[in-house]
Image (cartoon, helix red, strand yellow):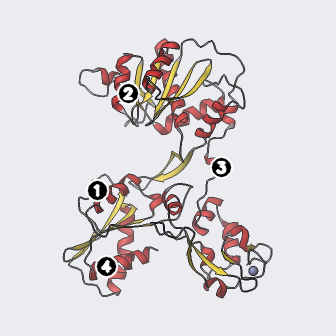
């Protein structure tokens, strides 16, 4: 698919003179990809360039830029007619968004995304889901059934061959090659293709079964051989971690702390103390009272000593709320300690700057996102610090669990090409973050008491 992209780009540079940006995950990838693939294809096709470096190929006013997405340097300020995002799942999505905005003034404005999928609802898998979803479909010569290849349905694992999903007779490479692309949702404005190795007929069922046997893990086989998203259950936080910390005792509801995640319409709130969490609530705007008024009521009713609120989403509203409860409400930002020492840094404890402290600086909390999640999981695993005064089957606990299960760990490559583990999200996870803010608030209270 990369070769297809290079040929298309080179052709349209020469004959249409359009501007194009081709991204790869890192600068290192650009330095490998361009000399070994792009330069060769341009050379053997006899295309003469006016400008020729690793990063830029140009003819007249047209150009192709090759760019990494993990780079300190700012994205280039140029307008583009077509962008190709290669290895989307390994690329930095914020930078891809930035490059997409470079096409606002183009009459063409085409985007091509290519990738091996990784996990569900992420990167190329999310795009394919939104697309018209083209599958390579063919008819069985024995029973006429129209179908596309699926691992569970079209493989005879005993005789190691491809079979019709309906009549179970053998499918030959000729039958598979006789197919055509058919969209599951014709008319959608993203054109998507699913290309598993099962339709590359130079690879036999026997080859792929061997790949599965030799694969280090199922993730590899699903992603690279079948072209399917895959989520390893071990990379998720299990429901058991919450359930094992449920306790029957009733909470005295004294000396409470509160964690709050902020969304457009709701506030996700967790209330509790050292003995346990007894409140899990979603606050919405209501008649005469908005969600912030309702949070203020909660803070007053439970005499919340420390309240930690997510500051990313709606900083101004949070600051306004913090002024209603001076030095009770702290504003949390996810930000790593550059010295990698502290997981949580409180503005009223240490110095972020040499300037005299203003209110806003004093109530600021900076938390290392990955490490606080690790610490929370550690607490839950060891059964310390975080308890829940809830019974099994309570709807609020079930909702918290459904948010917790959206969090999973994955390995990402940074700008210098090093691999790191990080926590990412598959969707609605607001109560999980409220739980983290609760932990930060509890931490603050324990420090104060010391
Ligand atoms: Zn058949």
The residue lying furthest to the right in this view is 158
* Label whose residue precedes the other's in the sequence (1 or 2): 1
Q: Is mark 2 within 8 Å of ligand 1?
A: no
* 2 or 4: mark nearer the eye: 2
Real-space Cα separation, disc 1 to disc 2, in angstroms:
31 Å
* 4 or 1: mark nearer the eye: 4
Please tell me in which quadrant of the rendered image residue 392 appears.
top right
Give the residue number, with chain letter if any, for mark 4: 12
Q: How many labels does the image show?
A: 4
- Residue for point 31% across, 28% down: 352
* Label whose residue precedes the other's in the sequence (2 or 4): 4
- Residue for point 70% across, 71% down: 209
Please tell me in which quadrant of the rendered image residue 399 appears.
top right
Q: Specify whether 265 is left or right of 63.
A: right
Contact? badges 4 and 1 (CB < 8 Å): no
* Label whose residue precedes the other's in the sequence (4 or 3): 4
SS at mark 4? Answer: helix
Q: Which mark is residue 233?
A: 3
From the viewer's side, name the closer residue of 443 and 189: 189
Q: Where is residue 9 in the image (x, y as percent from the top left)?
A: 34, 76
Give the residue number, with chain letter if any, for mark 2: 318
* Label whose residue precedes the other's in the sequence (2 or 3): 3
* Label whose residue precedes the other's in the sequence (3 or 1): 1
Is 392 rendered above or below residue 197?
A: above
SS at mark 2? Answer: helix
Is 175 rendered above or below residue 71?
A: below
Mark 4 neighbour density, 10 Å: few (under 14) some (14–19) many (20 or more) = some
Mark 3 neighbour density, 10 Å: few (under 14) some (14–19) many (20 or more) = few
């Amino acid at each position: 698919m990369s070769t297809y992209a290079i040929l298309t780009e080179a052709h349209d540079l020469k004959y249409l003179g359009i501007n194009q940006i081709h991204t790869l995950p890192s600068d290192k990838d650009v330095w490998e990809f361009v000399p070994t693939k792009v330069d060769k294809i341009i050379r053997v096709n006899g295309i003469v360039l006016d400008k020729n470096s690793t990063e830029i190929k140009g003819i007249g006013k047209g150009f192709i830029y090759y760019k990494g997405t993990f780079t300190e340097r700012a994205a280039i300020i140029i307008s583009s007619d077509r962008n190709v995002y290669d290895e989307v799942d390994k690329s930095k999505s914020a930078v891809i968004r930035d490059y997409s905005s470079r096409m606002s003034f183009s009459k063409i404005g085409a985007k091509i995304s290519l990738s091996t999928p990784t996990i569900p609802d992420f990167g190329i898998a999310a795009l394919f889901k939104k697309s018209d979803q083209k599958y390579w479909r063919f008819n069985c010569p024995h029973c006429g059934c129209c179908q596309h290849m699926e691992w569970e349905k079209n493989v005879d694992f005993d005789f190691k061959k491809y079979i019709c999903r309906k009549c179970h007779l053998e499918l030959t490479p000729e039958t598979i090659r006789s197919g055509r692309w058919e969209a599951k949702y014709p008319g959608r404005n993203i054109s998507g293709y699913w290309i598993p190795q099962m339709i590359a007929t130079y690879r036999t069922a026997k080859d792929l079964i061997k790949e599965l046997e030799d694969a280090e893990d199922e993730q590899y086989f699903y992603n690279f051989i079948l072209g399917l998203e895959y989520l390893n259950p071990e990379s998720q936080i299990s429901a058991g971690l919450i359930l094992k910390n449920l306790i029957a005792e009733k909470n005295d509801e004294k000396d409470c702390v509160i964690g709050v995640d902020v969304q457009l319409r709701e506030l996700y709130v967790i209330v509790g103390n050292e003995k346990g969490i007894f409140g899990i609530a979603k606050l919405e705007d209501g008649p005469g009272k908005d969600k912030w008024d309702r949070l203020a009521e909660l803070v007053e009713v439970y005499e919340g000593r420390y309240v930690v609120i997510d500051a990313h989403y709606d900083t101004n509203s949070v600051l306004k709320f913090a002024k209603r409860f001076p030095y009770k409400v702290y504003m949390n930002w996810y930000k790593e300690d550059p010295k990698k020492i502290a997981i949580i840094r409180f503005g009223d404890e240490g110095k972020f700057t040499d300037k005299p402290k203003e209110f806003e600086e004093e109530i600021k909390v900076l938390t290392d996102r990955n490490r606080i999640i690790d610490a929370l999981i550690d607490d839950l695993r060891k059964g310390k610090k975080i308890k829940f005064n809830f019974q099994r089957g309570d709807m609020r606990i079930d909702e918290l669990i459904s948010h917790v299960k959206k969090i999973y760990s994955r390995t990402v490559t940074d700008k210098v090409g090093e691999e790191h583990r990080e926590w990412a999200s598959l969707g609605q996870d607001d109560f999980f973050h409220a739980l983290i803010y609760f932990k930060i608030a509890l931490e603050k209270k324990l420090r104060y008491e010391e």
